[in-house]
Structure formats: C-alpha cells, structure tokens
C-alpha cells in the first residue's frame, strides 16, 4: 500500500520537475523583451483609461511615451503637469509645463432666455435628436439638454442643471479629457485655458445666425455686433459669421468685453463681484 | 378566391385610417408667395440660376442640376424672385431656397396645357430619359431619388420588368390612390413611356387590396395598353418598400447591399409615372404634385394639387386650419414621415401628405425594459434583429452593427411600432446607420 503512494508521489514530482525545465527553456527561447520603463510610466499615470491623451488607455500611452524620442506631443490631461513631470523623470527627461484646461459649455439658452417652441419626445440622446431636427427652440445651434456629455464623462464632472436645463462643468472634477467635446453633436463644448483661480472669460454662444434672428431665438445670443472686438485692448476677440470668439491665449481677463456686450453673451466665471463703478472712480481720484 | 400576393418576411398592419380616400383631387388656389428649396432630392443640391428681382414664369428652370445624381428645379409660379436665402426645412434646419412673389399665372409657352389624352409616344428611349432629366422628375413616393438615374441601366445589366408602385402602404395617405382613379389613362401612358425608356415588355402594377376601386378601374383599362398587368396585393406595411414590392410581385429578392436592377427589376411610383406622362407628352416639368391633407380632427380632409414651394400652413388653412388639440403635424406618412417643427415650411417634391395628429394620439408612450420577446425580429421585413442593433448602438459598438447588416435597414419603423416596451428602436438604429456610414467613408479615404 505504502509503496503505491510513494510511487505516485515520486512519479508526479519527477513529471513536474521535467515539465518545469521544459517550460523554463521555452520561456528563455521565446522571451519578449519589454522595456521595464513602460511599467514605471504606467504606474505614475492616473489609470483612468479615458483616452483623453489620444492613446488607447494608459498602457497605450506609456508604451508610446517610452518608445518616442520627442515627448512634446504627449500630454495626460487628467494627471496634468505633475504626472507629466513624473513620467518624464522615469525617462530621465523633462517636459514643458502646459496650461491646465477645462471644458466650457458655450450656450446660455435656459428656458427663461430661450423659449421652447416644440416638444421633443423621442429617444433621450442629443445625437438622435440632432439627426431628427434642429432643436426644441428657435436656435439651431444651441444645447438640447439631453445629456450626451453627461453620459460620456468618466469623472462625474458634468451634470444637467434642472432649472437651466444646461450642462454645468465642475472646475475641480473636470480633467479636460475632451470626451464631452467629442460627444456633443452641436459642438458646443470647448476646452479652454483654466486661468488663474479658474478665472475665465468666454463667449457663451455659438449661434451663427444674423443678429436679429439670433436674438429672436435667445435673449443671450451673440448678435455679432462687434462691440467686444473694438473694446478689447489685447486683440483677443475675432468676429466671424456673426459670432465673436475670444482667443484664450491672448485674453488677459480684463473684463472690458463683459461690460460692453449688449446681450450679456460674454460670460465671466469665478471672478470676485465687480466693484460698483462710482466707487472705483472715487478710489482713482483719491490716489491722484 | 385565390390567396393575394405579398412579401414573405415580417411586416405589420397598422390601422389604415384612409380618411381622405373618397375626396377627389382639388386644385389649391395659388399662394401669395412660394419658397422653393434647391435641394428637394437625394444627391447634390441644384445650382441657382436666377437672381433677386428676376421675373420668372411657371415651368422655367430656376436651379440647374449639378451632377448625375441631382435634379433641375423649376419655378412653380410666375412672379418676381424676392430673395435667395436660407429657409427652414421640415427638420428645422436652414436650407437654401428661392422665394418668389406670385404675380398672375403665366406659363412658359412650350407647355401644352390642354387636358386631352395624348397616347402615341414620339420620343425614343434616349430622348425620353433626357426629357425626364430636364423636367426634374424624382421618385414621388417620398424617397425623391432622381428618376433618370434609375432609368439609365448600367452596362452589363438588363431590366426585365418594370414595377409600378401603387401600394401606398402608409396609413392616412391617399394621394396615389386618387391619382390612379382620376388620372388612370395618363398614368398608363406614363408607364408605356417608362417601358420604352427601359426597353422592357412587361410592367406590373402592385396595388394593395384596400383600394378595390383603383384595382378594378385600372384592370378595366389595362387591356388597352400592351404588357401592363394589375395585381391586387394583401394589405401589409411596408409593401411600398421597393424590395418588398419586388418580392411580392415577382418573388425575387434583392441581394444585401444591391439594387433592384441587379435582379432585373426597376420600380417607379404611380405619381412618378404620371409626372413622366406630363413631362414627355405635355412638355410640363415637375412643379406641382398631389398632397393629401388629413387628420382625424381636421375640419376637412382633401387631396390637393399643390405648387412646389407652397407653405404647409396654407394647405392646413385650406383644410380648415389647425384644430386646438393638435399634437403633431407630420410631413409624409405616419410611419416614416417627419414631425414638423413649424408649419411654415415649403411643400417639396417629396411631400406626399400632411397629417395633423391630435395630442393624445401623437404622444409617445413611456418606454420600459426590453424583455426579449423578439416581436421586432419577427416583424422586420429585412430580417434584421432590431433589439440587438438597438443595444449595440446604445453601447456605441458600430463595427458590430455593420456585421449585423444594419445598412439593410430601410427605416420603415415596424420594430418601433410593434415593440410592447415602446422602445425607440428605430431612433437608435438610425443613429447606428449614420455612424456605420461614417466608418465606411473613413475606410475609403
């Protein structure tokens, strides 16, 4: 009885050792060298696999990052400059810092400002609604409020405001991965420079209709009057197709255009409230 | 009585509601002004030939076809060009259109305005196709595909049979029905012209059995025209789809991704046949068409001959105006038509009907979860699996949709109609189709 047991154990052990040797030899023979730095780079990446960098997930980014000579084209919008510095340190290189960006919704057409003229009862998707018709208001450019951008956001950074029916982006959570920019069939969302303390100024409208038509559809529409272009001291504003656009690289956040805009289409975010004008002038006098 | 013919796969039978079937065709009074869009057909938009302030006459070419798959646009009224500007189309987007203020009703001299029937055909096949092209004729069943393209049979293929679509399977619509009853002889001559253009000996007219008067009348006059047969068909939606009609009449199936000409068939609508008669025998280009105006609550339902470019609001006004509890105004049939965002849109070559729905019948019901009952699979006339395509589309798996033959879908809406969970199946499938087409285009580049 015991000899049977002993024999079995011995045979299986021998078989195991023999197979292990074969496996070891095969593994040596067909070894694929993988740069250990890929793992190291992947470890410092956020691991969100959002695709915001343009590569298929963080591993894909790390792979391309390690194999590439020039690192200037790489940027992880989720991790930002800290992550990029850490990743470059693995490679023994440095990368230039980039300004952090954030998604902005360029439409202010809440029901109060933009009357709903038809009722849509189809599938709850902006893409489908766009393929069927121009929208439930007189503005064919504006936000439909059905939330395709909310559905694609992996960071829970965007939600539809129940009162304005417009998407709201959270400055803290938004990583500027650009998923919502691609998802929006009306091209309303844009990535813009975050600015110091998240201060930013932008034209919150993409209506390219002529002034009267645009204004009839929405109270807060850009009517293409060009006042902001004239008042801007930094040449940051251009007017094309009845629509003003502020170049965020040139904008110095002076807020002159915000005051000038007759339809309040230019929005300022995260600024301290304006001091009343009289007081400001009085202060100037005092200093003189 | 022997079994009526129909197509084999899928299909539904929505309530017919052919309220306006007994109303003879009336001529709608001339409007004050018309807005004629330059893109009323599938293919490239036509190039505008007139400028602001120009005087135009009825039948004058105002926009020229800009390619092989394109069509001429003719003025439907006489008057002055007021503007060439963007006008809302039926989906609310702005499209280029020529707006003309109407003055009198002066036709160009070449049009023969007599009502007498002209039977003998003088033109040969090539000249017929040329005339049809010049007259801006497109498929009047609703798809608005330029007719001369269908008649130009590609080399290596041969047309064996001409199929005339008098099915009118969409509920409510009656414009083709009335046309068959009132313009039967003209239509038959139109069919003879199409037969000559295609060089075929046989033409089959398919009519659904809910129009017995039209079947009886056309059968009684068919003897006078060589090679024309009239067939009654079982009532089943979407029999008016050309692939379904071919299957029903000659029992052949168009291969996936193919065209009817691949199996020797060419399908034209009865409205197109009538337009061809007018273009070839009377030299009259396509600038008016029969439009059904109907609805359960509408004070009056009617079939009007309408000049292209007339505002939908005028049609509804002629029918007694919008009732108070109107929910939707649909351009086309209730199954495949489009809800309008405004009644201030022009009638185009593809407008077969305007239907005014009460708010309670037009509302979509709330949807619930798919229970995999497979009703959508059994009603799909193309043999697709709508529930699966719906899920793939929601998950953005468009390449898989391509493998599931989503491009065969003709958007008949049978799946959404039948779904007990009221899922918007077609909405998602249509989205998928658009994305798959994008993928295919990007592959070519």
Image (cartoon, coloured by chain):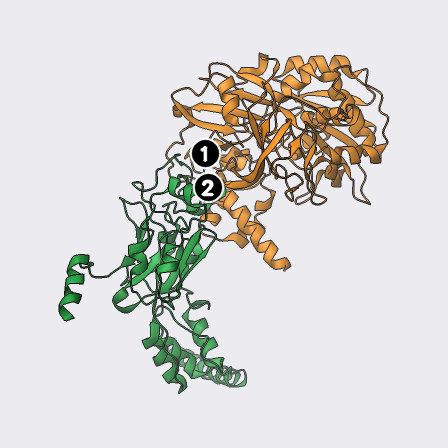
Position of residue B170 measured from the top left corner of the image (x, y, whole percent) = 57, 26
Q: Is residue A2 visible?
A: no
Q: Residues within 10 Å of mark 1 (few under 14, many from 20)?
A: many
Relative to the observer, which residue lies in front, A106 or A81?
A: A106
Q: Which mark is residue B313?
A: none
Residue on which disc 1 sits = B341
Position of residue A113 measured from the top left corner of the image (x, y, whole percent) = 31, 42
Q: Image check: A160 left or right of B319?
A: left
Q: Image check: B307 left or right of A278?
A: right
Q: Is residue A137 above or below residue B26?
A: below
The residue under the point 30% across, 67% down is: A195
Relative to the observer, which residue lies in front, A132 or A137?
A: A137
Chain painted green: A
Q: Chain of mark 2?
A: A
Residue on which disc 2 sits = A134
SS of the residue under disc 2: loop
Q: Is residue B214 above or below residue A101?
A: above
Q: Are marks 1 and 2 in contact (CB under 8 Å)?
A: yes
Q: Is residue A146 visible?
A: yes
The residue under the point 16% across, 66% down is: A285
The residue under the point 52% across, 47% down is: B432
SS of the residue under disc 1: loop
């Amino acid at each position: 009885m015991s000899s049977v047991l002993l024999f079995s154990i011995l045979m299986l052990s021998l078989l195991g050792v023999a197979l292990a040797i074969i496996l070891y030899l095969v593994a040596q023979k067909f070894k694929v060298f993988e740069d250990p730095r890929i793992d190291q780079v992947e470890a410092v990446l956020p691991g969100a696999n959002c695709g915001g960098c343009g590569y298929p997930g963080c591993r894909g980014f790390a792979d391309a990052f390690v194999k590439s000579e020039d690192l200037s084209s790489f940027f992880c919008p989720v991790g930002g400059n800290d992550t990029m510095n850490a990743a470059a340190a693995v490679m023994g290189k440095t990368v230039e810092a980039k300004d952090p960006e954030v998604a902005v919704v360029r439409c202010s057409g809440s029901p109060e400002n933009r009357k709903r003229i038809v009722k849509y009862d189809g599938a709850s998707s902006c893409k489908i609604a766009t393929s069927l018709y121009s929208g439930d208001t007189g503005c064919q450019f504006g936000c439909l409020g059905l939330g395709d951008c909310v559905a694609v956001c992996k960071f829970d950074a965007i939600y539809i405001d129940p009162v304005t029916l417009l998407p709201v982006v959270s400055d803290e959570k938004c990583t500027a991965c650009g998923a919502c920019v691609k998802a929006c069939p009306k091209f309303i969302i844009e990535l813009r420079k975050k600015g110091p303390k998240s201060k930013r100024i932008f034209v919150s409208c993409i209506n390219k209709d002529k002034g009267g038509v645009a204004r009839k559809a929405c109270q807060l529409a850009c009517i293409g009057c060009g006042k902001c272009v004239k008042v801007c001291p930094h040449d940051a504003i251009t007017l094309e197709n009845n629509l003003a656009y502020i170049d965020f690289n040139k904008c110095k956040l002076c807020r002159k255009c915000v005051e000038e805009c007759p339809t309040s289409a230019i929005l300022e975010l995260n600024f301290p409230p304006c001091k009343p004008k009289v007081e400001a002038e009085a202060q100037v006098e005092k200093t003189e | 009585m022997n079994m009526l013919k129909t197509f084999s796969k899928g299909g539904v039978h929505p309530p017919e509601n052919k309220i306006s079937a007994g109303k003879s065709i009336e001529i709608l009074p001339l409007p004050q002004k018309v807005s004629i869009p330059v893109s009323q057909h599938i293919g490239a938009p036509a190039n505008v030939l007139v400028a602001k302030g120009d005087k135009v006459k009825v039948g004058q070419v105002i926009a020229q076809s800009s390619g092989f798959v394109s069509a001429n646009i003719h003025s439907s009224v006489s008057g002055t060009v007021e503007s060439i500007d963007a006008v809302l189309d039926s989906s609310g987007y702005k499209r280029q259109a020529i707006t003309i203020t109407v003055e009198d009703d002066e036709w160009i001299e070449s049009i023969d305005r007599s009502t007498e029937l002209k039977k003998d055909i003088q033109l040969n096949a090539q000249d017929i196709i040329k005339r049809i092209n010049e007259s801006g004729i497109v498929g009047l069943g609703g798809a608005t595909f330029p007719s001369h393209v269908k008649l130009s049979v590609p080399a290596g293929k041969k047309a064996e049979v001409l199929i005339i679509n008098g099915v009118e399977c969409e509920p409510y619509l009656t414009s083709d029905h009335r046309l068959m009853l009132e313009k039967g002889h003209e239509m038959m001559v139109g069919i003879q012209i199409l037969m000559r253009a295609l060089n075929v000996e046989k033409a089959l007219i398919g009519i659904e059995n809910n129009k017995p008067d039209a079947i009886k009348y056309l059968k009684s006059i068919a003897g006078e025209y060589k090679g024309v047969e009239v067939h009654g068909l079982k009532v089943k939606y979407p029999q008016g789809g050309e692939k379904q009609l071919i299957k029903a009449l000659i029992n052949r199936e168009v291969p996936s991704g193919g065209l009817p000409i691949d199996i020797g068939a060419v399908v034209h609508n009865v409205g197109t046949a009538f337009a061809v008669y007018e273009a070839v025998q009377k030299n009259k280009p396509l600038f008016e068409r029969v439009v059904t105006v109907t609805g359960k609550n509408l004070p009056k339902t009617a079939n009007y001959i309408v000049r292209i470019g007339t505002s939908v609001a005028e049609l509804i006004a002629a029918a007694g105006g919008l009732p108070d509890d109107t929910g939707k105004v649909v351009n086309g049939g209730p199954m495949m038509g489009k809800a309008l965002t405004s009644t201030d849109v022009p009638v185009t070559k593809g407008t077969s009907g305007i239907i005014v729905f009460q708010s309670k019948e037009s509302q979509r019901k709330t949807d619930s979860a798919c229970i995999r009952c497979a009703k959508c699979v059994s009603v799909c006339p193309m043999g697709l699996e709508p529930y699966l395509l719906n899920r793939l589309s929601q998950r953005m798996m468009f390449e898989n949709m391509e493998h599931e033959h989503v491009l065969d879908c003709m958007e008949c809406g049978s799946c959404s109609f039948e779904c007990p969970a009221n899922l918007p199946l077609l909405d998602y499938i249509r989205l998928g189709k658009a994305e798959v087409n994008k993928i295919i285009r990007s592959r070519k580049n």
